[in-house]
Image (cartoon, rainbow, N blue to C red):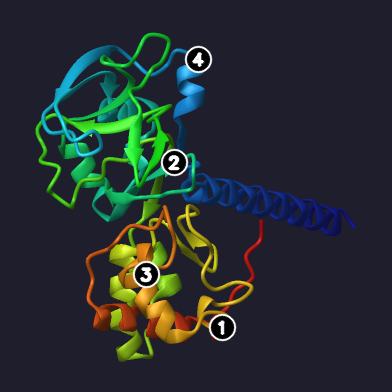
Amino acid sequence: MKTVKIRFIISCLIFCFLSCNKQKEQKIEQTVTAQPEMVLDLVALQANSKLGKDTVVTVINDPVYHKTKKYHAVNASLLLKNEMDLSKVDIKNTLIVFECIDGYKPEMPLELFLETKSFLAFKDVDAPKGSNWEKIVKNGNEMNADPFYLVYTSISADNQKYKWPYNVIKFHLEPKNKNIEALQPKDDEAAMKGFELFQKYCITCHAINGIGGEMGPELNYPKNVTEYWKETELVDYIVNPASFRNKVKMPTLGITKQESQEIVDYLKYMSGKKIEVRK
């Protein structure tokens, strides 16, 4: 009888030991795989006086104002390093995405951003009294750069690798392959040409299945743009938007009609790949 009791007690101890170990393993696994949210809210940092030390920077031939400008600014890459734990990020395979008030979301390699002396401007030295910014005039519309404008002191505005977004409110860190895997037409070589052009010219303003910018309309859900635009007119519109609409927000991309057709062919391909966009 005593032997049975001893065996029972030993079995219970072994069960408890294994259960505890399993729970520990699960906790360890959760600790390893958990990833922090890679979003930096610049407006919140400013409200809490956490942007860092400010300085005055000079930008020669500013691409937005088209002249030499001076700004009150903070070191953008230093701010990112101070506020995010980059030891948990694969820097070589990560993009930094700049979210703007109007939904515009340009991006560039995080590695390139960190290598460059970039500044987050929050006030224009030349702004009129009572304002933080000199007015920006674009396509007949007036606006300002508030709350932040990303600038560089040693990079030419002609270098397309670098982005100069204004109205910036957040920095996002995302894997380089996130958009490629979700939007790439792997089974269609012809559509691939249009996909590459879409990635280069369109995705900063337009989304497909919720992936991309929000400045322009979503192009695939619930209806693909090719389902309610005449194809020939859509091709012509992409080449020269101003020939269709006065004070149009969409810029002239400088692409050929053939390239525009390839973009439209890609959009037609994606019409069969709709994914519900949840708000």
Please tell me which residue lies in front, 54 or 16. 54
183 displayed left or right of 134: right
Of badges 4 and 2, nearer the viewer stands 2
Which of discs 2 and 1 lies nearer the camera? The answer is 1
Q: Secondary structure at mark 1?
A: helix
* Crowd tier of the residue under label 1, counting other residues whose Cα lies within 10 Å: few below 14, some 14–19, many 20 or above: few
Identify the disc placed on residue 48: 4
Res 185 visible = no
253, above or below 225, in the image: above
Earlier residue among tags 1 and 4: 4
Q: Position of residue 202 (x, y in %)?
A: 36, 64
Q: Is residue 216 above or below residue 129?
A: below
Q: Nearer the viewer, mark 3 or mark 1?
A: 1
Which residue bears the numbered disc 3?
180
What residue is shown with label 1? 227
Could you tell me how far apart the alpha carbons at marks 3 and 1 are, in whole angstroms?
24 Å
Identify the residue position indicated by label 2 in the image.
Answer: 100
The residue nearer to you, when weighing 143 against 21, is 143
User: Residue 177 is drawn in which quadrant?
Assistant: bottom left
Is mark 1 in CB contact (under 8 Å) with mark 4?
Answer: no
Mark closer to the chain start, 3 or 4: 4
SS state under label 4: loop
